[in-house]
Image (cartoon, rainbow, N blue to C red):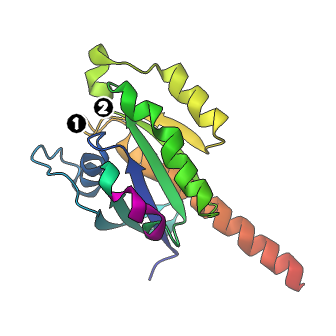
Amino acid sequence: MYDAIFKIVVFGDSSCGKTTLTRRFMTNFFITDVRMTIGVDFETKIFEINGMVVKLMMWDFAGDERFRFIFPQYIHGAMGGILMYDITNYSSFSHISNWFSIINETNQKFPIILLGGKVDLDNYREISFKDGMRAAKSMGLNEFIECSSKTGENVTNAFEVLTRIMLDKMSFKNRTAQSITT
């Protein structure tokens, strides 16, 4: 039995590290032979957080331009999202507003964190931490984190932060519903 089940979407440009991120979170290993995602990959993970058993259903969406037209259908019913870019690839960062606008066009409202990936390649960094923070703030996103799927730095933390936000939102809705009925 689960205390909560959440559908989350992991999205962003192709090759920014979405699949290695979800695989690292699932297995705690860095898997190097990842092939390009076609459409969407689906993973689930059950873990405990704040004394609650949570099941995450993670939808890793392909970042290739040719699949973007189906993205609005895949996010239907999502309760959280991770918008990811590669800190060594300015193009992936410049497209985050395009990805975010797709979410806005669907009129769905759910917590989203901005995640800068590949911090193990800091010597090749093209986007500063401050620029990532500024982008998350300007878009009204819930959090900004940088991570490395290769080293594992902040991978679990990213999913835990998003899960806590979703749990808080769920708790708020339950409190509000209880106050309306009493």
Please indicate whether residue 29 sits to the left or right of residue 43 in the image: left
Cβ atoms at labels 1 and 2 below 8 Å apart: yes
Residue 164 spot, x, y in % from top left: 56, 55
Residues drawn in magenta: 67-73
Tag 2 residue: 118
Please indicate whether residue 45 sits to the left or right of residue 55 in the image: left
Q: Is residue 122 above or below residue 137?
A: above
Q: Which residue is more in the foreground, 104 or 137?
A: 104
Please indicate whether residue 54 sits to the left or right of residue 182 in the image: left
Q: Label 1 vs label 2: CA separation?
A: 7 Å
Q: Which residue is more in the foreground, 93 or 48?
A: 93
* Residue occupying the point 51% across, 28% down: 132
Classify the position of the N terminus by image quarter. bottom left
Camera sees residue 62: no
Mark 2 or mark 1, which is nearer the start of the sequence? 2
Please indicate whether residue 83 sits to the left or right of residue 147 in the image: right
Q: How many residues crowd mark 1 within 10 Å: few (<14), some (14–19), many (20+)?
A: many
Q: Is residue 107 above or below residue 16?
A: below
Instruction: Name the amino acid type tagged 2.
Output: Lys
Camera sees residue 9: yes
Q: Which residue is more in the foreground, 96 or 177?
A: 96
Tag 1 residue: 150
Q: How many residues crowd mark 2 within 10 Å: few (<14), some (14–19), many (20+)?
A: many
* Residue occupying the point 46% across, 19% down: 128
